Amino acid sequence: MAKKVPNIVTPPPGPEALKWIQRDNEKMAPYNRPFYYPLVVAGGEGAVVRDVDGNEYIDWNSGLGVLNVGQCHPRIINAMMNKAKDFMHYSYTDFRFREPVEMADRLDQLLPMKCKYFFANSGTEANEAALKIARHSTRKQLFIGFIGSFHGRTFGTMAFSSTSLAQRRRFHPLMPGVTLVPYPYCYRCPYKLEYPGCDLWCVDFIEEWVLQKFVPPDEVAGFLFESIAGEGGYIVPPPEFLPRLKRLADKYGMLLIDDEIQVGCGRTGKFLAIEHWGVVPDIVTLGKAVGGGVPLSIAAARKDVMDLPPGAHCTTTGGNPVACAAGMAFLDILLEENLMRKATELGDYTLDRLKDMQAKYQVIGDVRGKGLAICIELVKDRKTKEPVDSKDFIGRLFRKGVLAVSGGVGVRIFPPLIISREMMDSSLDILEATVEEVNREYHGEN
């Protein structure tokens, strides 16, 4: 690895990248096309990613939220290797082994409710399990979700995901019994109201118009929600929203199903993002970072809620011993290296720098986030809030050596929690130079 990063030795995409992009296009299903930008990864370490042409980038997306402790953390690699020497797999669907129980013990120390656990491989699998757990426990068939959230692309979770038409086009009919209501996106309020004068109409609307008009509350199993909407652009709800939603759920005997797949595992400075509002959910789903970089996901439910009978829901490779070893190593690193405190401190520092930029550049319309789950929205005009093309913006960052991704109409900033202050400053300097370019294009010189 180069000592100074970013280190762009060949303007991307270089010749090796172009070769592999062509081969990829010939061989692979086109489900992810177009990609964010023409990156072909060859390796990495910590918060640095290296491509096949030798370029080195600062990672601002943590491998899409999976690498909270960075790429190839030696403690995770050692844990995986040591466990793989014992055994690689023996289906936890049908047989017992120690590792899932040991990981459940670790999670017991971190989650705010007493749980039983279901282990799977991906976030969407965990959410599918959560939906089945909720239906079986409540004996109710309906759900309420939120517009602008993302929970997966399987037929169950697809009914709740609504950040892109591509997720739904030509796949109807979706799972029945799901009603979506607006998420509290205050910068772009769907009701054209302003907080706090709105008095949280987004919650009252659910009760007064949805539950009293066309969704019988006694038939609703629960709410599926992201405590901070990740794919939508780290939309942080107003502080009263989740407590009010909890009171509404309790009033009608509905469960709170908290999808923490992207914002959990310490990213916001708390193990669960929902902890910022003092709300205890009934079911929590974890994924992405919980496996330390390998496929692992978990649906954790209150003991009285997790009543699925044998055979009702299973997965052959969920709770894989090597994945659990990696997950336990991740939890150890998170706690022993005080990474949640670091996420809070470095996140606050980053938000301050971004707000200074917002005061300086008209093109920055909104800055928001908690911990190292941050988003900025670039707008052509602050009054109309017409968004700047975020794909173009992250493409500019890529060519300068920073790997970021969009979220909704914004640009997400969620680097590994182990990123250094020096590296964060370097990437923020690149961001500011790029913001200045775009600001000049829309607003001229400052």
Image: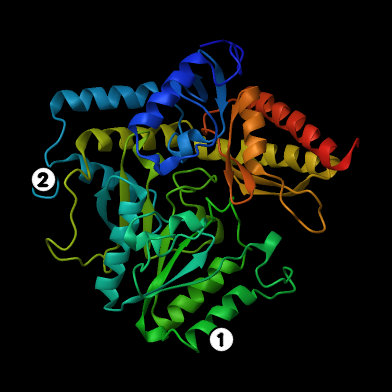
Looking at the image, is mark 1 or mark 2 earlier in the sequence?
2
Above or below, comparing residue 379 to residue 46 in the picture: below
Q: Residue at x 46, y 24 (%)?
A: 40
Instruction: Give amino acid for label 1.
Output: Glu
Q: Can residue 338 be seen from the camera position used here?
A: no
Q: How is the image coloured?
A: rainbow
- Badges 1 and 2: C-beta atoms under 8 Å apart? no
Lateral position of residue 52 relative to residue 26, left or right: right
Residue 85 place in picture, x, y as percent: 16, 23
Q: Secondary structure at mark 1?
A: helix
Residue 126 place in picture, x, y as percent: 32, 54
Pointer 2: residues within 10 angstroms few (<14), some, or many (20+)? few
The residue that disc 2 covers is: 96
Q: Outermost residue toward the bottom? A: 213
What is the count of numbered marks?
A: 2
Circle number at residue 208: 1
